[in-house]
Image: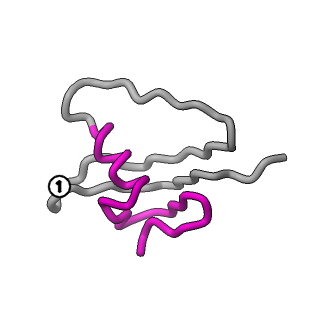
């Protein structure tokens, strides 16, 4: 069994005090693929910004390759 390289659990993502995504949960293993599809303004870019550290995860649990997304 592989270890998750990206993990979010019950994540809430805010941008400028506005809730963008709520209760996001998923795990990705090495070699997995994910597609983000949605209308403009639905939080796709905010999710990616959270994963690479541009936005802090304010609620829930999140880590990318062992790095905590809340700090």
Residue projecting furthest to the bottom: 71
Q: Residue at x 29, y 41 (%)?
A: 45
Q: Which residues are magenta?
A: 43-71
Q: Nearer the viewer, residue 27 or 2?
A: 2
Horizontal side of residue 44 vs 34, given as left or right: left
Q: Residue 18 occupies which quadrant of the picture?
A: bottom left
Q: Position of residue 51 (x, y in %)?
A: 43, 53
Horizontal side of residue 44 vs 40, given as left or right: right
Locate the C terminus by quadrant.
bottom left
Q: Which residue is mark 1?
A: 18
Q: Residue at x 74, y 53 (%)?
A: 3
Q: Position of residue 65 (x, y in %)?
A: 60, 59
Q: Residue at x 61, y 65 (%)?
A: 66
Horizontal side of residue 36 vs 29, given as left or right: left
Q: Nearer the viewer, residue 6 or 25?
A: 6
Is 66 magenta? The answer is: yes
In the rendered view, tell whether residue 39 sits above or below residue 15: above
Is 36 magenta? The answer is: no
Q: Position of residue 70 (x, y in %)?
A: 42, 70
* Mark 1: secondary structure: strand
Q: Residue at x 63, y 52 (%)?
A: 5
């Amino acid at each position: 069994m592989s270890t998750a390289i990206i993990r979010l659990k019950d994540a809430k993502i805010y941008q400028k005090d506005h809730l963008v995504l709520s209760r996001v949960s998923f795990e990705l293993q090495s070699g997995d693929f994910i597609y983000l599809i949605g209308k403009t303004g639905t939080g796709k870019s905010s999710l990616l910004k959270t994963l690479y550290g541009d936005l802090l995860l304010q609620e829930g649990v999140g880590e990318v390759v062992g790095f905590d997304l809340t700090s």
